[in-house]
């Protein structure tokens, strides 16, 4: 669906269901809506969208967001921009993200609401920084806003043309996945006006963002909550959100399952965090945390740290994922899946990666290392951990009948 078609559907009072091109997503969305369609929801909630949410741990849900909630999100983001000294109506919103994700839908809707210009960037341009710079030159008289995921930022920063293009932008929101520390350092060195942010489909996108000035001053985290949002932490560190734009719920088998909230309106996200001087710092996903030897371990920051160490050491590691494995003594231990390039023998690379982890606490060190040539996140930089757990389980089953050199246990 195109942006213009979505606008026409909303004008007719319709809820529009948006899914990616993958057949399994289309089938899952159709099953969630059920045979009765969206008419009952339209009568209750008016125009809106149904979007996929989650997926990082395999639990994809189809989330209802009324148009009024999306518009409230755009209003709050506009207020935040004004606090940064930017006039939302005078900005150009560059958008490289797909419409069927809330992070791709909101840039267009914000521009519509603010009366600002909007331009969609072709995905191929983001993979070729020189092509992007030629196809989308930045007008120095108009502040350009951009929303990226860390994977896209990393690709652009890999080429001088990409860095030079990014340096011309007025503001770059980065969200959807943790910003690797080494990438943040490089962005500061290049003077990029990054605004790390946090949000979800259930919250109608952004709920907090770090001002670029604070990012450049080496502040960590995702900033303070926007004007229409409250944040708190639960006893287990879970990030709680209270806002008038929380989703009514998820669709499953034709029924709307209400979004779980406390009696006073708080929704518990699946993320763990802490509140620091610069606002929210997201630690990792609660559903991917493991309990190892009495310690709670969050794989995501360890992945980012190890990948940065490997790249700094010149190791040919392209992707890395840490997953839990049952251990009779520790409860759970980490397994490392690695995608590498080049001709370096796998046992040598594994030994070098192990050495990088030696200073870590015992519960944080992977106990197995698996070479996974096809390992990659989604286009939006999210890890489908259930998919790679299935891959690991299949490898384990195959090894029981025929050992393979793809799995080399630690020395």
Image (cartoon, rainbow, N blue to C red):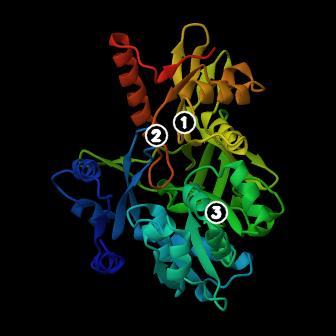
Spot occupied by residue 407 in the image (x, y as percentages of width and height): 48, 21
Tally of marks: 3
The first of marks 1 and 3 along the sequence is 3
Residue at point 66%, 89% (across, down): 140
Residue ranking furthest to the bottom? 141
Q: Is residue 402 visible?
A: yes
Residue at point 49%, 43% (across, down): 383
Quarter of the image for the C terminus: give it.
top right
Quarter of the image for the N terminus: give it.
bottom left
> How far is disc 1 from disc 3 in space, using C-alphas?
22 Å
Tell which tag, 2 or 1, sits nearer the viewer. Answer: 2
Is 111 above or below relative to 281? below
| Residue 375 marker | 2
The first of marks 2 and 1 along the sequence is 1
Q: Is residue 335 visible?
A: no
Quick check: marks 1 and 3 in contact, CB under 8 Å? no
Mark 3 packing: few (<14 Cα in 10 Å), some, or many (20+)?
some
Mark 2 packing: few (<14 Cα in 10 Å), some, or many (20+)?
some
Residue at point 68%, 16% (across, down): 294
Q: Which residue is mark 3?
A: 157
Spot occupied by residue 249 in the image (x, y as percentages of width and height): 40, 51
Quick check: marks 2 and 1 in contact, CB under 8 Å? yes
Residue at point 72%, 70% (across, down): 193
Residue 154 placement: quadrant: bottom right
Mark 1 packing: few (<14 Cα in 10 Å), some, or many (20+)?
many
| Residue 371 marker | none
């Amino acid at each position: 669906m195109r942006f213009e078609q979505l606008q026409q559907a909303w004008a007719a009072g319709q809820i529009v269901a948006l899914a990616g091109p993958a057949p399994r997503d289309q089938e899952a969305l159709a099953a969630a809506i059920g045979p009765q369609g969206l008419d009952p929801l339209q009568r209750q909630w008016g125009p809106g969208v149904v979007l996929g949410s989650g997926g990082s741990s395999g639990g994809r849900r189809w989330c209802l967001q009324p148009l009024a909630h999306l518009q409230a999100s755009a209003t709050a983001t506009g207020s935040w921009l004004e606090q940064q000294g930017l006039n939302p109506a005078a900005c150009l919103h560059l958008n490289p993200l797909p419409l069927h994700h809330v992070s791709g839908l909101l840039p267009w809707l914000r521009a519509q609401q603010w009366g600002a210009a909007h331009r969609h960037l072709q995905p191929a341009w983001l993979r070729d920084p020189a092509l992007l710079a030629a196809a989308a030159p930045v007008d120095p008289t108009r502040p350009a806003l951009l929303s990226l995921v860390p994977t896209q930022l990393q690709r652009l920063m890999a080429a001088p043309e990409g860095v030079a293009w990014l340096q011309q932008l007025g503001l770059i929101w980065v969200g959807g996945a943790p910003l690797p520390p080494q990438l943040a350092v490089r962005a500061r060195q290049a003077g990029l006006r990054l605004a790390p942010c946090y949000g979800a489909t259930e919250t109608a996108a952004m709920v907090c963002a770090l001002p670029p000035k604070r990012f450049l001053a080496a502040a960590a985290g995702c900033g303070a909550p926007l004007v229409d949002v409250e944040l708190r932490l639960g006893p287990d560190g879970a990030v709680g959100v209270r806002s008038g734009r929380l989703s009514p719920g998820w669709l499953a088998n034709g029924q709307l399952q209400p979004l779980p909230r406390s009696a006073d309106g708080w929704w518990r996200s699946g993320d763990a965090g802490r509140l620091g001087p610069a606002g929210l710092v997201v630690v990792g996903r609660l559903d991917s945390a493991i309990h190892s030897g009495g310690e709670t371990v969050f794989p995501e920051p360890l992945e980012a740290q190890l990948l940065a160490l490997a790249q700094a050491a010149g190791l040919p590691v392209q992707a890395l994922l840490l997953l839990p494995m049952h251990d009779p003594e520790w409860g759970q231990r980490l397994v490392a899946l690695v995608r590498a390039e080049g001709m370096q023998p796998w046992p040598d690379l594994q030994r070098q990666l192990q050495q990088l982890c030696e200073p870590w606490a015992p519960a944080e060190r992977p106990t197995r290392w698996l070479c996974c040539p096809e390992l990659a996140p989604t286009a939006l930089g999210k890890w489908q951990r259930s998919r790679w757990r299935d891959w690991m389980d299949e490898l384990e089953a195959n090894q029981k009948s025929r050992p393979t050199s793809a799995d080399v246990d630690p020395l």
